[in-house]
């Protein structure tokens, strides 16, 4: 994710946090027309789809947000854009109406209490046997790599966060702090144990880690296979499904 206005130590300040909140507030106002037409756009998209699949956090390219990443056959949504959805709030879909929910590097941008609600809402809108697939930076995976002796992989992570280090020497603590609260707008980074607990509390079953090669949906699989090495070494894929 790019930040165009603040690139130095101001990211550690209260002013930066306020700026981020104001950006989302005014961004939503600017995008209000798409909020008003959202329901119709969703209905039009799904009218031609045998299986109803959603990607949350697809990017919009607006207001300094991530570039758009489209997946064929998926309703691609983001906080801004043509079909704006903020996962902090009630999802605009009928209960038991969706087959697959996918998100990539999104869930870590909301607080844990909001994850509870998002997972409950995801469980509500999924059909029986519906699938939830979440790709997210893994705190466990990143820490294990950074404290390992594998300099090649460590340097991939250090290089990926070079701007976030703001010219300081790469250290594990600086990377973790950048990921958890200084940069990127992250609110809560997960490990599998925490996701498993949150998903179980929301009513999900069969909660597990998933390798890219074992993903059934070709759209999601190809999307993840095309990600760069920095993404892959820091990301884990968590899976859960709805049995009732």
Image (tube, helix red, strand yellow):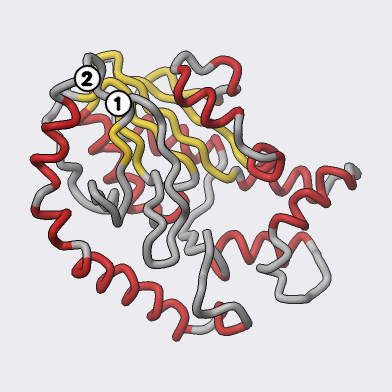
Q: Residue at x 53, y 45 (%)?
A: 190
Task: Report x, y in % for residue 68.
Answer: 42, 47
Residue 132 position in % (x across, y down): 37, 27
Say which mark, if any, is on residue 122. Answer: none
Q: In front: 148, or 28?
A: 28
Tell me which residue sits at (50%, 79%) in the image.
5
Residue named by callout 1: 53
- Give the side of residue 137 with respect to residue 194, left or right: right
Residue 49: mark in rendering: 2
- Judged by depth in the image, the label closer to the viewer, 1 or 2, is 2
In this image, 108 relative to 132: left or right?
right
Q: Secondary structure at mark 2?
A: loop
Q: Report x, y in % for residue 133.
A: 43, 29
**Residue at position x 18%, y 47% in the image:** 90
Disc 1 residue crowd, few under 14, some 14–19, many 20+, Cα 10 Å: many
Judge the density around disc 2: few (<14), some (14-19), many (≥20) Cα neighbours within 10 Å.
few
Please state if 108 lies on the left or on the right of 98 as rendered: right
Q: Quadrant of the C terminus?
A: top left
The foreground one among 106 and 35 is 35
Q: Position of residue 194 (x, y in %)?
A: 50, 40
Q: Quadrant of residue 110?
A: bottom left
C-beta proximity under 8 Å, tags 1 and 2 = yes
């Amino acid at each position: 994710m790019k930040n165009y206005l603040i690139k130095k130590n101001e990211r550690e300040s209260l002013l930066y946090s306020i700026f981020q909140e104001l950006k989302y507030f005014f961004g939503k106002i600017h995008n209000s027309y798409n909020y008003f037409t959202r329901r119709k756009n969703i209905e039009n998209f799904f009218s031609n789809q045998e299986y109803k699949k959603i990607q949350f956090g697809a990017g919009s390219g607006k207001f300094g947000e991530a570039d758009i990443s489209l997946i064929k056959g998926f309703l691609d949504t983001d906080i801004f854009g043509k079909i704006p959805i903020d996962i902090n709030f009630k999802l605009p879909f009928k209960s038991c109406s969706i087959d697959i929910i996918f998100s990539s590097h999104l869930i870590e941008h909301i607080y844990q209490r909001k994850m509870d609600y998002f997972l409950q809402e995801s469980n509500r809108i999924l059909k029986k046997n519906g699938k939830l697939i979440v790709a997210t930076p893994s705190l466990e995976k990143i820490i294990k790599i950074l404290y390992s002796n594998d300099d090649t992989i460590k340097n991939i992570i250090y290089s990926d966060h070079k701007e976030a280090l703001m010219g300081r020497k790469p250290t594990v603590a600086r990377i973790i702090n950048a990921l958890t609260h200084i940069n990127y707008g992250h609110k809560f980074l997960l490990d599998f144990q925490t996701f498993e607990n949150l998903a179980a509390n929301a009513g999900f079953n069969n909660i597990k880690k998933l390798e890219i090669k074992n993903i059934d949906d070709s759209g999601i699989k190809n999307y993840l296979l095309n990600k760069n090495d920095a993404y892959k070494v820091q990301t884990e894929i968590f899976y859960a499904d709805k049995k009732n």
